[in-house]
Amino acid sequence: MATRTILVMVLIAAVAQPTVAEDWNPSGDTAMACYLELLVLSGYGRFSYERAAFLVLEQDGSLACMHWPPTFQYERIDYKGGMPANVVAVVHTHPYRSEHPSAADRAAAKRLRLPFVVVAPTTLSIIDAHGATTTLAAGNLWWKKAGFAQ
């Protein structure tokens, strides 16, 4: 499978065409736990850098949260390497001052034909592969309301 280099919002990745499952649950326990892990690692939006992960559908049908190595760059994260097989979504954090999906996030979701989940302190949004955005959770401390208090 050939790889190509592309610019993804503020992500740089060598990407192979992924196998995408259409029936994963973005509000399921494993996905929500992944979002919370990233939120914690980003200081609940207080840090100026982003954290990210791939949500991957395992052979047994379960989801896995594959964290990207941290880059500690200002309001961005870079991923270099091949995209794992069976990626169902790219998940990344946004800081307090930039809580909603950006135009670059929407463009990247469309370009990769993958959902992008934006995890922020007061908003959890998903951008589908066509660029449409849905708010999964909103409000101050949404993760506590969702039962994921830390």
Image (cartoon, rainbow, N blue to C red):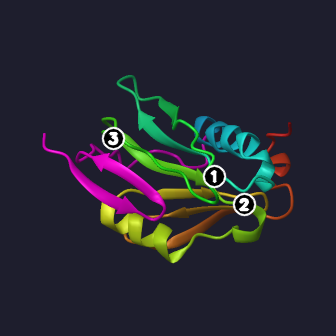
Q: Is residue 19 visible?
A: yes
Marks 1 and 2 close (CB-CB < 8 Å): yes
C-alpha distance separating marks 1 and 2: 7 Å
| Horizontal and vertical percent position of residue 68 | 51, 38
Q: Secondary structure at mark 2?
A: loop
Q: Give the crowd class for mark 1: few <14, some 14-19, many >=20 residues within 10 Å.
A: many
Instruction: Identify the amino acid type marked 1.
Output: Glu
Whether 22 is among the magenta residues is yes
The residue that mark 3 highlights is 83
| Horizontal and vertical percent position of residue 26 | 55, 49
| Horizontal and vertical percent position of residue 95 | 72, 60
Give the magenta part as a residue range. Answer: 1-28
Which one is in front, 134 or 12? Answer: 12
Which one is in front, 40 or 4? Answer: 4
Q: Is residue 113 visible?
A: no
Which residue is at a point 39% across and 54% down the rendered structure image? Answer: 12
The residue that mark 1 highlights is 50
Marks 3 and 2 close (CB-CB < 8 Å): no
The residue that mark 2 highlights is 95
Mark nearer the N terminus (3 vs 1): 1
C-alpha distance separating marks 3 and 1: 19 Å
Instruction: Identify the amino acid type marked 2.
Output: Pro
